[in-house]
Image: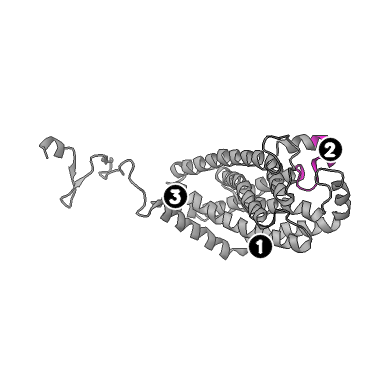
Amino acid sequence: MSDDTAGNDSVRADGGRADDAAEVRTDGGTARPAGERLSGNSFLGDFWVNFVRWNLKAVRNPFVVVGSLVQPIIFLVLFTQVFGQVATGALSGGSAGGITYETFLLPAIAMQVSLAAAAGSGIGLVNDMEEGLFEKTLVMPMSRSAMFLGKTAAEILRIVVQIAIILALGTVLGASVATGFVGAVGIVLIGILFSLWFIALSNIFAVVTKDQESTIIGANLLQFPLLFVSTAFLPLSAMPGWIQTVATFNPITYGVDAARALMLDRDVMTVIEVTRFGGIWDTLVPAVVVLLALDIVLGGIAVYLLNRASSSDVQ
C-alpha cells in the first residue's frame, strides 16, 4: 500500500485504522460513517424485537384489546336483533336482495373490528411518548422502518384474531359465507389491507398531537361518521342522495364492499360501475386498488413523520 493511500485513514487508539468516511466531530469524537448500520441486529432482528414488544404490551393491557372486540360484537348482536326485520325488508329490493341481515351485516362488522383495532395504534404510540419511552426508542441503534413495521405487524396479528372471532360468532347467529373457507380467509386479508390506512392515520394523529385524548377524539371523530355514511349498514339505494355521494369517496365503502363480495360471492359494488373483470372481481379489483393507494400514501406520511420526529424531538 502506498503512503498516499495509507494517509487517507486515521490511526485509532488501539493501533488500527478508522475508515476514512468517518468525520471528526467538534468534540473530538467521530461521526458514524454514512451507510453504516445502526444496530448489530439485522433488519429482521429489529423487526422481531419490536413485534414481540408490542404484543407483550397488548397482553399486559388487555382492556384495549377486549374493548376493541366487545364494541363490534355489541354492534353485531344489537343491529341484527333490533333492526333485522326492518333492514331485511330494505335488502329485498336492493342489489343484495334475498339474504338475511346477519349475512349482509357481518362483513361490515369485520371491517369495524379492523377500524377499532387500528384506532388503538396511535394511542399506544402516545403512551410511549408520555412515558418517555418513545424518545428512548428513537435513540436506540435500530432501523426506524423495522420499528414501525414490527409495531404494525403486532397490531395486524390482533386484527386477524378479532376478525376470525367475529366471523365465527356471525356464523353462529345465522350468517353464511357463500365462498366458504377460502372466502373467509379473503375477508381477513381484506380486513388487513383495510386496516393499514387507518393504522397509519392513527399514528399520524399521535405524532402530530402528541396527546392521548386528542388522538382518541381524532380517530373516533372519523371512525363512526364514516361508518354510517358508507354501505356498511344499509345498501346504497336505501340511503339519501347526499350520503350516496359521500359514500362514493368514503374508503370504508370499498373495504365493506370487498368483504361483502366475498361473503355473497357476487359483484356488490354500486358506488362505481366496473364490468371489465367479471363477477366478484368487478368489486374486488377496484376496492383493492383504492385501499392499496390509501395504504401507500398514508403509510408513507406516517413513516416520514416518525423519521422526522427522530431528529426534532430527541435531545
Q: Earlier in the sequence, mark 1 or mark 3?
A: 1
- Between 114 and 141, the residue placed more toward the observer is 114
Q: How many marks?
A: 3
Q: Earlier in the sequence, mark 3 or mark 2?
A: 3
Residue occupied by mark 2: 240
Amino acid found under the numbered disc labelled 2: Pro
C-alpha gap between disc 3 and disc 2? 48 Å
Q: Which percent across, then down, holds residue 242?
A: 80, 34
Q: Can I make out residue 119 in this image? A: no
Q: Earlier in the sequence, mark 2 or mark 1?
A: 1
Amino acid found under the numbered disc labelled 3: Leu
Residue occupied by mark 1: 66
Magenta region, mostly helix, strand or loop? loop
- Between 286 and 108, the residue placed more toward the observer is 286
Q: Residue at x 76, y 38 (%)?
A: 270
C-alpha gap between disc 2 and disc 1? 35 Å
Q: Which percent across, then down, holds residue 215?
A: 62, 48
Q: Is residue 174 left or right of residue 310?
A: right
Q: Secondary structure at mark 3?
A: helix
Question: What segment carries the magenta color?
Answer: 228-242
* Mark 2 crowd level (few <14, some 14–19, many ≥20, 10 Å Cα): few
Residue occupied by mark 3: 138
Q: Residue at x 82, y 57 (%)?
A: 80
Q: Can I make out residue 102 in this image? A: yes
Q: Which percent across, then down, holds residue 58?
A: 57, 61
Q: Nearer the viewer, mark 2 or mark 1?
A: 2
Up the image or down, 293 lies above or below 215; here it is: above
Snapshot quadrant of residue 293:
top right
